[in-house]
Image (cartoon, rainbow, N blue to C red):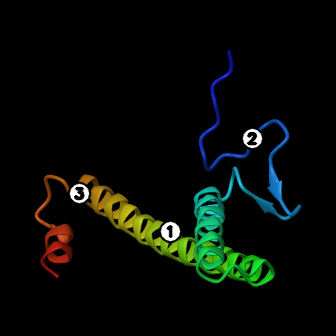
Amino acid sequence: MAAAPQPGEPAKGKTFKLLGILDVENIPCARDSVLYGSLGSVVVGLGHFLFTSRIRRSCDVGVGGFILVTLGCWFHCRYNYAKLRIQERMAREGIKNKILYESTRYTPIESVLRM
C-alpha cells in the first residue's frame, strides 16, 4: 500500500479543482474555507427565508453569505498559516545558531531571545 501524501505535497492522482482553478486538496486553508462558506450560505439563506419568506432574495443573501464567510475564513486561516511559518523559520534559525555556536564563547542566540 502506498502512503497517503501530506497536505502540502502534490498528489499523484486526479485532484479536485473547484471551478477548475482552485486546487482544494493541495492549497492550505482552501478546503476548510469552502466548507465553512457553504455552511454559512445555508444558514444565512435559510435564516433570511424564515424571517422574510422571499425565495429569490434569500438565495441572493445566501450567495453573499457564502462569499463573506469563505473570504473571512480564508484570510483568517492564511494569516495564522503565515504566522506559523514565521515562527517555524525563527525556531529553525535559532536551532541552527545554537548548534553552530555550541561550546564557544559566542552566544548570539541569547541576545535574540532577550528581545
| Residue at the (14%, 58%) spot, across then down | 104
Residue 86 sits in quarter: bottom left
Q: How many marks?
A: 3
Residue 87 sits in quarter: bottom left
Q: Residue under circle 3?
A: 98
Q: Residue under circle 1?
A: 77
Disc 2/disc 3 C-alpha distance (Å): 36 Å
| Residue at the (36%, 58%) spot, across then down | 92
Q: Which image quarter holds the C terminus?
A: bottom left
Residues tagged 3 and 1 counted as in contact (Cβ below 8 A): no
**Residue 103 in the image: x percent, y percent?**
13, 52
Q: Earlier in the sequence, mark 2 or mark 3?
A: 2
Q: Earlier in the sequence, mark 1 or mark 2?
A: 2
**Residue 40 in the image: x percent, y percent?**
59, 68
- Horizontally, residue 3 falls left or right of residue 63, namely left
| Residue at the (68%, 15%) spot, across then down | 1
Q: Earlier in the sequence, mark 3 or mark 1?
A: 1
Instruction: Say few, some or many: other residues with alpha carbon within 10 Å of mark 2 (under 14 / 14 to 19 / 20 or more).
Output: few
- Of residues 78 and 51, the one nearer the viewer is 51
Disc 1/disc 2 C-alpha distance (Å): 22 Å
Outermost residue, right side: 20
Q: Is residue 55 above or below residue 40?
A: below
- Of residues 63 and 57, the one nearer the viewer is 57
**Residue 75 in the image: x percent, y percent?**
55, 77
- Of residues 67 and 83, the one nearer the viewer is 67
> Which labelled disc corresponds to residue 11?
2
Where disc 1 sits, the SS reads helix
- Disc 1 or disc 2, which is closer to the eye? 1
Q: Amino acid at mark 2?
A: Ala
Q: Amino acid at mark 3?
A: Lys
Disc 3/disc 1 C-alpha distance (Å): 31 Å
Where disc 2 sits, the SS reads loop
